[in-house]
Image: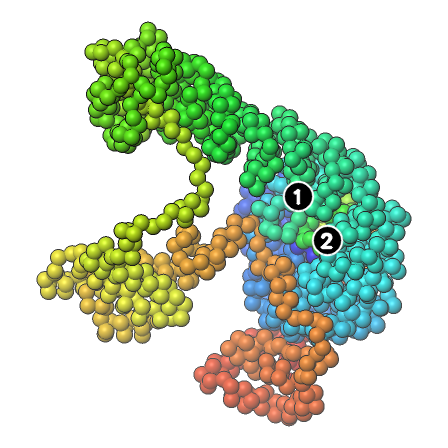
Amino acid sequence: MIKAFIVVNNHAMVRLCRFYEQLGVDKQTELCQTVYKLVTSRPDHLCSFVDDEKTFGPDTKLVYRHFATLYFCILSDRSESELAMLDLIQVYVETLDKVFENVCELDLIFNSPKAYTVLDETVVGGLVLEISTNKILNVYDQLMKLEKMHSSLMDKIAIS
Amino acid sequence: MTSYYDRARGSVAIGGSLGSGDKTKMAASRLFQKSLRDMITGIRAHKDGQREFINKCLVDVRTEVQSSDVRTKAVAIEKATYLHSLGHSMHWASFHVVELMSTQNVKYKRVGYLAASQSFGDDTDVVLLIPNLLKKDLASPNPAEAALALTCLGNIVTPELSQTLVADVYSLLNNHKPDLRRRACLCLYKCFLRYPEALRPSFTRLTECLDDDDQSVVQAAVTVLSELAMHNPKTYLPLAPKFYKLLTSSSSNWMTIKLVKVFGALAPLEPRLAKKLAGPISEILETTSAKSLMYECVRTAVMGMTSQEKVIRQAVDKLKDMLEDHDPNIKFLALHALTYLLDSHPRIVAEHKGNIFECLDHEDSNIQYCALKIVCGLVTKRTLIDTTSVLMNCMGKADQRFRDELVSSVIRICMNERYALVTDFVWYLSVLADLIRVPCSSHGALIGEQIIDVCLRVEVIREAAVGILAPLLLDVSLLEPSNVNKTVPSALKAVAWVVGEYAHHIVDHEEILDALLNPAVKQLPGDAQAVYVQAIFKVYASAVLNYSRGIRPTGAVGALPAPEPLIDISVDDDTAAASGAARDGAGVTPGTLVPESEDLIELRDKVSRRIEPLTTSFNLEVRERSCQLQKMLGIVGAAERSEPGSGIAIIEAFATVMSDEIQPVSVKAQRKIEVPAELLDDEPMSAEWDYLLVSSDEEEDDEYASRKGKKKGKKSKSKDKMSKDLREVAEIFGAKKTKEQVAREERESREMLAKHKEKMGQYYLEGETGADKEKKKGPPKSLPGPESAAMLALEARLASHAVGQTERPAIKGESDSESEEEEQVIAVKKGKSYDPKNASSRLHGELEAYNPLKPLERNEHLPTVEAYPRFDPYSQDEAAFNAFAPSGGDARSHHKDKKDKKKRDKKKKDKGAGGEDGESKEKKPKKEKGAGEKKSGGTKKKSGEKKTVDVDALAQSLMDAKV
């Protein structure tokens, strides 16, 4: 199971985080900072896995990937495959790229609700729902269409 | 601002397009509300005063969120969610989030759900309000809404939510939309985790999902079942055939990975499985192009299929390619997989030695550590020397942390299982000597221990040991107090001891003495200096003995005094004994006296001169030993002057005593010695003391009892007893007190107790009444001042122990083992920064209790929404909301008979809320019920006040529940 999904930039600013296990806000911030310190202390040409029992406790591994200014990090337990987690990050970033058309950090800052929606279409409660970019996009587009329709409908009702 | 606002309001009113004031207000609030984008831009612009700006935004959001306009509210919640992600908790907005979740508009609903997913947790109180809302949305004809609810539930599920809603989620498994079916599958897993009872009734249906027509549903079911099986493989072994079928037919890489992974956990438990799996796994290994899938196959093979040589071969071939890969990820994983083979196929792993050794120099510490682990696991008697030299070579290039790890690994592989692998101890000693020189090492003490251990145990290497270790003493650079030599002194201490102890093997005594007397020695820590001083004496004595033996033609033995009395002397006070020995030695020595040579006089002078600085050391040990040495040398000099050769005789006598080497003694040796008949170890030492011992024993028992008793709420009793004992002990020690004294002390202690109660009232189990009672009874007759203070302190500690166990410092061996273990666990937990309240690993422990494959019991019906154990969040809360409780927990006992339930439902409908109250009356005390009614009335009123369209829906859902 995925325990947490964190996106943090080069300057320790958390751009997106979702925790699939109960954690207080303080603990969440603390964890984000620990993860940030761990990933930034490792140059890019090193491997993307960190097994640090002292910081994360037993049965928790960190898989991360560095894209431009952002680190995409996943904390998971032993039942997830490391390489599959890297694929998942790839899928997520690709999807974001299509949703935002050339995604950059600013997109994540200003449109975090969209990014969260995409994440929710990919991972549900820590389990992977879909790993095909196209399918995620389809669902996302349908959702947006539905919302638009619904909104205009509601507006019409309000006006009338 | 205000004026503009008024004007705007006025103009709109004049325009007349919106009639009511409410609507104007709405429009205005929309007009002046900062959008999410504005706020983020603002935060980014205020680089300096960011904190204040955010605080201002929070204030704005707090007011906006109250707005009756949905759009304003939604934007406010969006902003609050953003601020939440920056670390500003939005727990205050939870009620508004629930309001937003209940709107009709999907867009705003989504904002609400997103905020809930982000901010709701086990401790959010509104979770009591959302079950009905989620229930409604889960059953919504709009699949988007149901999907939203499922996703949100998956993220925020609590045991209560799970209990209430698991039936609804379950029923979605039968939905005609595959999308909802797969989401329901995933959501169910989270429900199981928080409410394990739900697993058994839904398990059959869940396994049926493995045969679903839609691949995505199958994939979701595989995900859930494999997740369950990974944590508790034994229980899910019967699922293996189904998994196997899917493995051979699966087309999705993702699902195949999951299946292969689950087989990795199942295969070690069932040997036949490995044989069956060999075919498909080797086929996948052959055909797949996806590295992730291939790696999982390899891992499954090395973990659970070690009996299948062919597959292992194939897997190891793949691993070889991976090891040579340039991608550090692949390299690391390959090494990781190899560690599994260490036990079963060390030969196969050894084939890749070259690659693995290369990895020791890799830049990535993960890869280095993993490689080191394999290297250490591969070592045999034959390869020990080569491997060690490779590891030693690596130390030069490695960074500090890894170098330390290398040092400790070298020592560990050598010392393991009582030096099982070491055949040449001279070699090992030279390795240890080299390890001392490793800069910045933190294992000096360990090396020192090893040096002494090896020298003591292996007699034959002692001569070589002196030869190997002496150069270390001569090396002045090791004495420098710098970070590089951080732990070298503890190793030098051992070196000095060994060289001193086996001083008769020294070739050039003068050289060694020079090194030991080096002024830089003063920079070593005190304990090392003390050993140095002792070594100086030993080496000097050995030098003298060497000389006299060389001169005396007939051999040493005859010339020496008998050792018997000398042993006593050496045990006694040294200085006094030395002078005694001087006289005795001079008198007793039967052989010829050898006068001191020029060289020896010079040597003696040098030692006593250069030991001088140490005689003023602040370390008592060093000072004492050096003073003794100096004095002794003075006595030798005096004796030598009065009669040439008698001084030498003294030293000779000492040298003989010291030449008795310490021999290794087995730990069990003590057992072999018989207890002398005259030693009565059961007899009491004295009657008086015995009494003291008894009383202190009781005290300990009481302390223990009081701690235990505390948990049961019997504190005051044990406290009385304890204080009584304390008083008894006090009476034994102290003189008898006058009545006034006793009275005064009593008063004092009572005051202190009262004060303490005032301060630490929360820790006292019995509230006011208990305290009163105690007053009436009076605190135990006399609580002497200081003791009572100590007792109060103890009590406070005990109290805090009961309230928050973590506050109590862990002292090993202080209490019974049970609580110690507990504390250790807590200590470990505290140390972690990542410690979620519902760590899945812990939750899986609970899941284990529910074997999903056991046939359902008679009252455990196949699950339908109605038959599901229903949970009513309101009933648990002291019946606070029992007005709309659908009869809470007792539904569970009734659900075995559906008909009965229906009947009851009908009855309920007839009677309405009143009937229900009647039902609950039997169970709940009147007082509680009254409070419940009052409170429920309050909520009703509260929800009634909100008359906007959106909140109506919420209220409606609440009312629904009531009927």
User: In the drawing, what numbered circle is on residue A80?
Assistant: 2
Residue A70, compared with residue B702, is above or below; it is above
Asked if residue B97 shows in the view, the reply is no
Subunit of mark 2? A
Amino acid type of the residue tagged 1 in the rendering: Val
Look at the numbered disc 2 and give the secondary structure of its residue. Answer: loop
Q: Residue at x 71, y 32 (%)?
A: B357
User: In the drawing, what numbered circle is on residue B893?
Assistant: none
Subunit of mark 1? A
Extreme-top residue of the structure = B598
Question: Looking at the image, which is closer to me, B906 or B328?
Answer: B328
Q: Which quarter of the figure is the C terminus of chain B placed in?
A: bottom right
User: In the drawing, what numbered circle is on residue A50?
Assistant: 1
Rendering coords of residue A53 (x, y %) = 60, 47
Amino acid type of the residue tagged 2 in the rendering: Glu
Rendering coords of residue B277 (x, y %) = 83, 57
Question: Looking at the image, which is closer to me, B585 or A117?
Answer: B585
Tell me which label, 1 or 2, sits earlier in the chain. Answer: 1
What crowding class fits label 1: few (fewer than 14 Cα within 10 Å), some (14-19), or many (20 or more)?
some
Asked if residue B218 shows in the view, the reply is yes
